[in-house]
Structures are given as C-alpha cells and as structure tokens.
Image (tube, grey):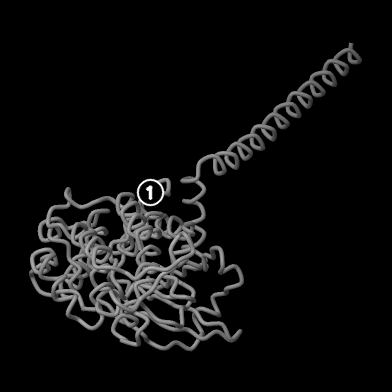
Amino acid sequence: MEKSHMIILIVTLSSSFVIFLILFLICVCTRKRSAGNEAWDKEANPELKKQTEVEDIEVKGDLIRFEGGEDLTCFDILDAPGEVIGKSSYGTLYRANLLSDSVLLLRFLRPACTVGKVQDVMHVVQLLGAVRHPNLVPLCGFYSGPRGEKLLVYPFFKRGNLAQFIRDENGESHKWEIIYKISMGIVRGLDHLHTSLQRPIIHGNLKSKNILLGRNHQPFVSDFGIHLLLNTTALQDMIEDAEVEGYKAPELTKAKYFTTQTDIYNLGVILLELITGKEPINGKTNASEDLHLPALIRKAILDHRMSDLYHHDVLENDNGGSTCVNEDIIIKFVQLALDCCSPSPSHRPDIKQICTRLEEIGRKS
C-alpha cells in the first residue's frame, strides 16, 4: 500500500514538473515572439522606430549624421573655432574650421525660437536630412544640446552667396549665360523640393543670400525648411525680416504661414535681382506694383549692365553657331519674373510651368 502511494506521489510530482516546464517554455516563446514582433513593428512602422530613436537622442544628446557627415563627431562640432558670418532673428551662422582642415557651415538656432517637442524637431530633421539634389545644400548633421540649443551642419561654400555675387559688379554677373545658368539651377532645386519628394517641402525663406555658389557659378539653394523648426513668434519675425529685405509675398500680411506660392513670389524677386542687378524693393510695396514691364525694359536698355547683355554677350546655340542675346529674350525673362511676383497667388505659375518657360527661353538664346 505504501509502495503504491509512493508511486502516485512520484507520478504527481513528475506531472507537475512537466506541466511547469511546459508553461515555462510557453512563456519564453511568447516573450521571444513578442520581442520579435516589436522589432518587426519598428522596421515596418517608421514612426514607431523614429519615436524610439528620438528618445535615445534626447537622453544621450547624440549627433545625427546624414550623407556627407558620416565622420563627424560631437567634438568636431562643439569644439571647432567658429567665425560669425551672419545673424538673423532666430539664430547665428558660423564658419567652423575643423582640426581636419575641413570647413563647415553651422547654423545655430536659439532655444527660445524653436518648437518645443523633441519628436517634432527630429521628424523635420530626418525629413530635411534625406533631401539630396545637385542644386540644394545638403544637411550633413544635426545636434540638439542639453539646454535646447540646436545646430544644423552644412558644407561650406567659399565662393559666397548670390547677393554678394550680384553686388560685386565684377563683370561676371552681367553675362547672360551666367544669369541663365544660375536661374535654371535655382528653379531646378526648388522644383525638387516642391514636386519630387513624397511630401513637398516649402523653402519658406528663399532669397539671394540663401543661394550659395559653387564652381562655375553652380547655384545651391540653402536653408530650405528651416521655418518648420521655428515657433510661432520666430516665424513672425522671419516674415517681418522678409518684408524689410523685399521678399514678403503680399498674402503674408494676413496669412501667417508659408506656401509653395510664397516660394514662387520670392523666386520672382531673385530673378529680377539677377537680370537688373538691383536690390529688392523693401518697405510695404511689392515688386509687381513698382516694376512695370515696359518702363523696366526701357530703363534696362539704357543701363550699362543690360547694354552688355544685348550687344556683347555671345552664346553658343544648338547648331554650334553663336548668337547675341536680344531684347526679346530679356523681355520674356523679365515677364516670367513679374508673373512670379503677381499680387495674387493663384495667378503665379507653379514651379513646373516656370521650368518649361525658362527652358524655352534658353532654347531661343
């Protein structure tokens, strides 16, 4: 009898152990599957993955690197001697000399001027960091510091910006071939921002100071999308700065946000700068009110700059010959610029139409 009780006890304990072992294995497998699903979800859901990355960045104060900035370190960015080369209402622009003898452009955004949520900032930074085009300045890195300071890292262009080039009066800015090349490059860069991405990126602060020049006068549009990182107060300051400099679209008097059509307005102002060599009109009037086409062309013909364009600038045409730039070409170019500056946003051409018209002008040159 005692023996049978012992057998029953052994069987019971063995069964309990087996059941416990089975339950333990089930728990382990469930946890592994859950972890695997979580990892898969992060890969399949970019927003979930992005949120996790943002939390890590916020804790570690890490430097985000993009194409062209893979070798950058926090030490490079924070300890590099910097020279102030520009200031705005929302930040400061530095030329930074790295120990490796390379030079970077650092845009510092004041903590009081940027949006508060780290997740919102990182979403914009990832969006801007992915943009690559031959006529756009690439974002190479981004650093968010413990006190809310933010640094955007760009390559440095030693040839300066378009505003400096136009005001230099060194003769190059008078040449139609160069004017056309710069115009076409700016338009192609803006076209990429407006139409070639999954979601359009509005530049928001397009002006000649934000067009950098590379070799052979290749233009690079810089600072696109910066407005997405700024708070409401800083955005209003940016609009007021645009008014002072002559780039404020008329609709921004009532509207408080930028659109693709405000970018087109600014593009028109830049094209007028290029062809006339004059600074934008500042104050409360807009370009289309003050620059009437016939009067502008008559004045331009008498101007030495435009005289150079008409009589001395020679271009190669498609047939291998050459032709002087004529008045009709300049009129079409100015008319395109003025159409971009129309007081009504709905009357402005979109960027694709501008590309087409500018290409037609180039073919007739």
Outermost residue on the right side: it is 3
Can residue 216 be seen? yes
Mark 1 — residue? 195
Establish if 212 lies above or below 261: below
Which structural element holds mark 1? Answer: helix
Which quarter of the figure has residue 290? bottom left
Q: Nearer the viewer, residue 313 or 170?
A: 313
Quadrant (top left/top right/bottom left/bottom right) for the C terminus: bottom left
User: Quadrant of the image for the N terminus?
Assistant: top right
Where does residue 360 sit, x and y in percent of width and height?
34, 55
Q: In this image, 206 relative to 130: left or right? A: left
Residue closest to the eye, 336 or 207: 336
- Density class for disc 1 (Cα within 10 Å; few <14, some 14-19, many ≥20) is few
Count of numbered tags: 1
* 276 horizontally vs 101: left or right: left
- Residue 197: % across, % down: 42, 49
Name the residue located 13 percent from the left edge and 53 percent from the top edge. 344
* Residue 253 image offset from top left, x and y in percent: 10, 61
Q: Amino acid at mark 1?
A: Thr
Q: Nearer the viewer, residue 178 or 218?
A: 178
Q: Which residue is painted at 43% across and 77% down in the image?
A: 106
